[in-house]
């Protein structure tokens, strides 16, 4: 589900879960299903220049779900928005966001989606 340069990483899933039900849009057996206000946040420092992820609208939910890709330069003490993305498809789409120099942590936040959900898979953090 989640790949980074190191073999292990701790992630916070707030208002999100790892699942593989029939309505989940995922590559393999499991993916992340996120609900309104969800936060998927890397909990350890690294050095990242790009985040790539696959996202889709969950099940029969309406399109137009917005997510923000956020980053932290100070180990999670403060966060800045790298890009806001609108998810329109019910099939997985790949999104790639370039990050500024010095990024230590990354988060994906589901916004403006009252009562709607999204699926995420293959999150990749790259140098």
Image (tube, grey):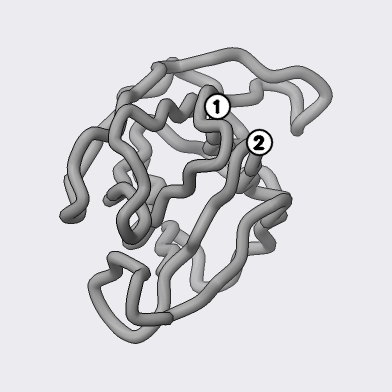
- Left or right of 18, for residue 75: right
Residue 42 percent location from the top left of the image: 63, 48
The residue at which mark 2 appears reads as 37
At x 62%, y 57%, the residue is: 16
Counting every numbered tag in the picture gives 2
At x 57%, y 32%, the residue is: 114
- Left or right of 79, for residue 113: left
Relative depth, front residue between 33 and 12: 33
Q: In the displayed orientation, state which residue is furthest to the bottom.
A: 29
At x 55%, y 72%, the residue is: 18
Picture disc at residue 111: 1
Residues packed near mark 2 inside 10 Å, few (<14), some (14 to 19) or many (20 plus)? some
Residue 25's place in the image compared with 12, above or below, is: below
Residue 30's place in the image compared with 104, above or below, is: below
The answer to whether the residue labelled 2 contacts the one labelled 1, judged by CB atoms less than 8 Å apart, is: yes
Residue 33 percent location from the top left of the image: 49, 60
At x 50%, y 64%, the residue is: 6
């Amino acid at each position: 589900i989640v790949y980074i340069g190191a073999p292990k990483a701790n992630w916070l899933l707030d208002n999100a879960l790892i699942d593989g039900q029939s309505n989940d849009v995922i590559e393999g057996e499991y993916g992340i299903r996120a609900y309104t206000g969800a936060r998927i946040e890397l909990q350890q420092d690294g050095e990242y220049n790009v985040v790539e992820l696959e996202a889709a609208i969950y099940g029969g939910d309406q399109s137009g779900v917005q997510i923000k890709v956020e980053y932290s330069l100070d180990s999670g003490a403060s966060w800045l928005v790298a890009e806001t993305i609108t998810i329109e498809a019910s099939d997985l789409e790949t999104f790639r966001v370039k990050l500024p120099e010095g990024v230590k942590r990354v988060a994906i936040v589901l916004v403006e989606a009252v009562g709607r959900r999204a699926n995420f898979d293959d999150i990749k953090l790259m140098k």
